[in-house]
Amino acid sequence: MKNLIKLKWLLLVLGAFIFENNMNAQGCVAVRATGCSGTTNSSTLLKNQLEFSTNFRYFESHRHFVGDVEQKEREELHTEVRIKSFAYDFGFNYGLSDRFFVNFSVPFVINNRSNNHYTDKAGVAKRFSVQGRGLGDIRATGYYWILAPKPEKKLSLLGGLGVKLPTGDPSQIDVFHALSSKGKDSTYFKIVDQAIQPGDAGFGVSLESQINYSIAPKLNLYASGYYLFQPQETSNVLRNTALSETDTIQNYLSITDQFLARVGVSVQPLSNKYPLTISLGGRLEGVPSHDAIGGSNGRRRPGYTVTAEPAINYDFGSDRINFSIPISLYRNRTKSVYDLSDPTGKAHGDAAFADYSINVSYVHRFGSSHVRM
């Protein structure tokens, strides 16, 4: 009975948190779909409890930004890059004790990138698509309740330490098109853009935290933070087929740090008979220009996006369904190391961002139901 009461309180506090494996920044800013683990999940496991989770995320990016200024002419001239991303994540959470649990996450991605490959002799731009797909970078994370949730306490604090393994392919190739010397369409193989590669070849260490505060019955504040440290500067993947003597900074693809911060409020608007939780929050996510540890050379598109994040969570028995649509409010493609190396200060690359993303997740708990107060 004591454990049942404890479990009810835990689920109430964290019911609004969506199990979301990714922090993909909705576009060319190369945050992996495997970048963010856990503090957004609803795992409040007792000892020896096990959860299976699956998550789906979709977005399409097409709005180009230099700094925070949208390059509207790209769409008007039909020169924009369009990326469609489909990410699937399968994970397990296991309770080693009432305060310590571990998470294992295995992602798969299908990413399509469309842009103009060449202009024919009639002046017509020819648009084609290439793809990156397959296993992403696997993660393993341990979480510990520093301030354990208790019915008589309003505040709880969770910390996490994890690793990201370079299991995703960082160098997939696809068929590109070009105009031949005879004026006909020809094809060749080339490495696809880093924004659609399943992996980045980096071994990373992540730090996470999550804090929850009960304002009133059925009303809670939440905040979480995530940072992925990747000390390795670049992969061994060439940006182009040959080394450039003039652009030495961007010869290879950069292995970047990643960050995420979230804050919001959740509420149970209905009676306990209908276990529905609605939340509204804001999130900041992106890639820094300079990594916290190690060098920052290589081809990268740093930047960040600020989104509003409405979400719905519904529990039924041992199962839980979550749905959220983060909507972009502000996008900024910051300067990279390469841009900052320009003595004139004028260099500033662009990146494409999405207007929104769609997230749907399902969680099943073995051995006990998602009981609510």
Image: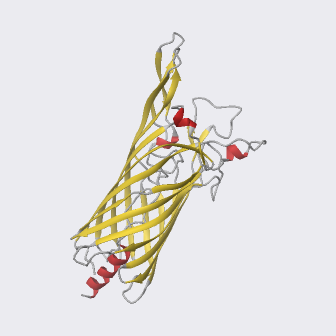
Give percent across and percent down for residue 63: 52, 43
Q: 36 or 286, which is in the foreground?
A: 286
Q: Is residue 238 visible?
A: no
Give percent across and percent down for residue 308: 47, 61
Give percent across and percent down for residue 158: 45, 75
Specify the quadrant that holds the N terminus.
bottom left
> Going by the image, does 257 lie left or right of 131?
right
Q: 306 or 20, which is in the foreground?
A: 306
Specify the quadrant that holds the C terminus.
bottom left
Q: Is residue 135 visible?
A: yes
x 25%, y 78%: residue: 272
> Going by the image, does 245 lie left or right of 271?
right
x 46%, y 27%: residue: 127
Rendering quarter of residue 300: top right
Rendering quarter of residue 234: top right
Looking at the image, which residue sits at the far bottom? 152
Q: Is residue 121 above or below residue 356?
A: above
Q: Is residue 124 above or below residue 306?
A: above
> Going by the image, does 351 lie left or right of 4?
right
* Colour pattern: secondary structure
Looking at the image, which residue sits at the far top? 182
Across the whole image, how many numbered discs are drawn on residues? 0
Q: Is residue 91 above or below residue 129?
A: below
Give percent across and percent down for residue 12: 33, 77
